[in-house]
Image (cartoon, rainbow, N blue to C red):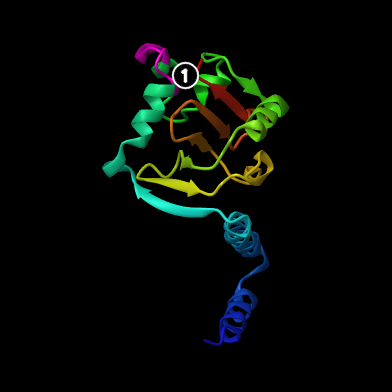
């Protein structure tokens, strides 16, 4: 397939837009580029990514029961847990490592097989296999991502807010 025709068509579309619309085009392309670079980085590291349908696996519920089990429903409501699960860390309801300590703790973990979920993709969880070379910096452009081992003993969370996180929590 000759992709040069796409480039020509895209250029024509961009040329037809007023300058005020170019910012939207830029950010749309940037999102696509970053997702591509993220996936390419994972594949270059030999990571095998499988897509799991959440309703068939209940992994998000297991995340809740593993990492937020001691947080009451009332507290969850007050901190808007349903909006962002990571609020248990940002509101200091669950003791955890933050910032560089969190990154270092994540990097030190054995990570052959992992689950990965995004706050804004409630129906999908990813399984990462052969993930031993993954490090915290691989997720620096992701937003509201939860990475955790398949035994639900630890989780690493990278948020969309630069002043919140990343967070690392390990069950004791």
The image quarter containing residue 4 is bottom right
The residue shown at (46%, 38%) is: 119
Where is 139 relative to 92, above or below? below
Does residue 27 show up magenta in the picture? no
The image quarter containing residue 68 is top left
**Which of the two residues, 81 or 107, is positioned nearer the viewer here?**
107
| Residue 71 position in % (x across, y down) | 42, 13
Where is 41 relative to 107, above or below? below
**Which of the two residues, 122 or 40, is positioned nearer the viewer here?**
40
Magenta-tinted stretch = 67-75
Does residue 68 show up magenta in the picture? yes
Side of 15 relative to 111 (left or right):
right
**Which of the two residues, 157 or 112, is positioned nearer the viewer here?**
112
Judged from this view, the residue extending furthest toward the left is 56
Which residue is disc 1 drawn over?
A: 79
User: Label 1 neighbourhood size at 10 Å, few (<14), some (14-19), many (20+)?
Assistant: some
Side of 20 relative to 171 (left or right):
right
| Residue 56 position in % (x across, y down) | 27, 44
| Residue 126 position in % (x across, y down) | 44, 47
Side of 20 relative to 87 (left or right):
right
The residue shown at (69%, 42%) is: 137
The residue shown at (33%, 43%) is: 54
| Residue 100 position in % (x across, y down) | 72, 28
């Amino acid at each position: 397939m000759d992709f040069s025709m796409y480039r020509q068509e895209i250029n024509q579309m961009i040329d037809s837009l007023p300058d005020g619309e170019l910012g939207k085009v830029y950010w749309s392309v940037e999102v696509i580029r970053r997702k591509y670079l993220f996936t390419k980085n994972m594949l270059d590291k030999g990571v095998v990514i499988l897509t799991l349908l959440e309703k068939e696996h209940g992994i998000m519920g297991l995340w809740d029961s593993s990492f937020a089990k001691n947080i009451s429903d009332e507290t969850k409501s007050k901190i808007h847990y349903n909006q962002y699960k990571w609020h248990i860390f940002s509101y200091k309801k669950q003791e955890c490592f933050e910032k560089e300590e969190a990154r270092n703790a994540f990097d030190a973990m054995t990570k052959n097989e992992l689950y990965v979920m995004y706050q804004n993709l409630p129906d999908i969880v990813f399984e990462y296999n052969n993930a031993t070379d993954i490090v915290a910096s691989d997720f620096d452009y992701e937003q509201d991502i939860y990475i955790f081992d398949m035994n639900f003993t630890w989780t690493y969370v990278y948020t969309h807010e630069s002043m919140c996180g990343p967070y690392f929590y390990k069950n004791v």
